[in-house]
Image (cartoon, rainbow, N blue to C red):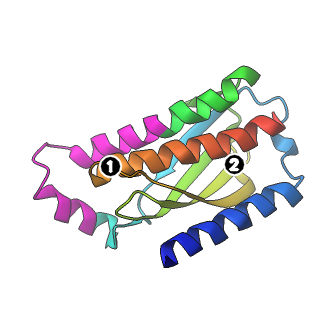
Amino acid sequence: MKRLSVFVLSLLIFVSCFAADSSWNFMKGVKAIDVEIDFHQAIINNFSEEEFVTYYSQFIQQENWYHMSQKYWKKSFLEEFADQTLEKHCLAGEAPTAKIKMLITLLSATDSGDLLTSIAFIDKETNTTLKTVEMASKGGHFGGIINLISDGFQELGESIGKQVRKHL
């Protein structure tokens, strides 16, 4: 119940920030967004990133599983984000020529894949942060922690994609 309350409160704060905020003008006409996800500050299932990798390595016997999981999570995010922004002809991913970078910092992930993130939109030419928002997203219901976190990134991609689409 506590986790649900925190999630609902975070979602309400997020919605109110977007509803009252008109500082999205930098997104007008953007056709490409460079997306980077930072996992280094993350607390995943009550573990630091390093502890998470150490603990789950005893169950996952595949080499480089964590790096592959990060790519999978980013792909899940990008697919949902693209579904929301493609009609406005805005591409996201590894876009070295993009003028805007979206830096997603994973702050925490629960065992059900619920995420708390900080998303910074950065002008790549000046390295200036144009806007920062914190977002929560709901994970999944079935599967292992890797898949549940992927579900959280899918919901995050859809949510932020809808907001970005409004301002393109």
In the image, taking residue 79 as reference, residue 122 lies left or right, namely: right
Q: Is residue 167 above or below residue 131?
A: above
Residue 55, visible in the rendered structure: yes
Q: Is residue 22 above or below residue 63?
A: below
> Which element type, helix, strand or loop, lies under badge 2?
strand
Q: Quadrant of the C terminus?
A: top right
Quadrant of res 75: top left
In the image, taking residue 118 as reference, residue 139 lies left or right, namely: left
Quadrant of res 102: top right
Give the prevailing secondary structure in the magenta stretch.
helix
Q: Residue furthest front?
A: 1
Residue 153 among those drawn in magenta: no
Task: Give me the disc on residue 142.
Answer: 1
- Badge 2: residue crowd in 10 Å (few <14, some 14–19, many ≥20): many
Which residue does the numbered mark 2 point to in the structure image?
122
Amino acid type for the residue under numbered disc 2: Ile
Residue 118's spot in the image, x, y percent?
60, 60
Residue 115's spot in the image, x, y percent?
49, 59
- Badge 1: residue crowd in 10 Å (few <14, some 14–19, many ≥20): few
